[in-house]
Image (tube, grey):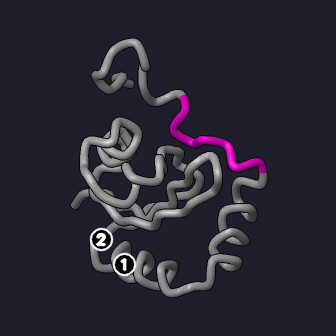
Amino acid sequence: MGEFHAYIMASRKRVLYVGMTNDLQRRVYEHRKHLVPGFTARYNVDRLVYFERFRDAYSAIRREKQIKGWLRSKKIGLVESMNPDWTDLAASWFDERDPSVRSG
């Protein structure tokens, strides 16, 4: 079995996006580079500020839906409970000079 994630991305102005994926590094890269048209590209949502790991897709999907159903204030509280400074948790994952994902 693989690994699955529920995650929250944010823009500099703290526009939030909640998602789920089976490849967090790839998905964050897609958000950062605006490779998929839509909400995150439109609002420049490009910083990973929160994530949780799950062993199965069902649990990750259930958590994603739960978080999406919350008021914005509760989502902010979740982020700040683990990441009070809103640090980009994926800041060191990519070499911005090279579009490929860093290995290791």
Q: Nearer the viewer, residue 103 or 15?
A: 15
Instruction: Say if 2 sits above or below 100 in the image.
Output: below
Q: Quadrant of the C terminus?
A: top left
Q: Which residue is mark 1?
A: 59
Where are the magenta residues, as a range? 85-91
| Residue 99 vertical position relative to residue 9 in the rendered view, above or below | above
Distance CA(mark 1)–CA(mark 2): 6 Å
View extreme (top): residue: 97
- Which one is nearer the viewer's eye here, 20 or 13? 13
Look at the picture and state if 54 lies above or below 90.
Answer: below
Q: Position of residue 44 (x, y in %)?
A: 47, 47
Rendered residue at 45%/67% (across/down): 18
Q: Which mark is residue 56?
A: 2
Give the answer, above or below, for where 92 lies relative to 76. above
- On the image, the x and y values in percent for residue 97 come to 40, 12
- Is residue 32 visible to us here? yes
Give the residue type that dot 2 points to: Asp
Where residue 50 sits, quadrant-wise, is bottom right
Query: Mark 1 is on which residue type?
Result: Ser
Quadrant, the N terminus:
bottom left
Q: Are marks 1 and 2 in contact (CB under 8 Å)?
A: yes
Picture residue at 67% right of the left edge, 43% below the top: 87
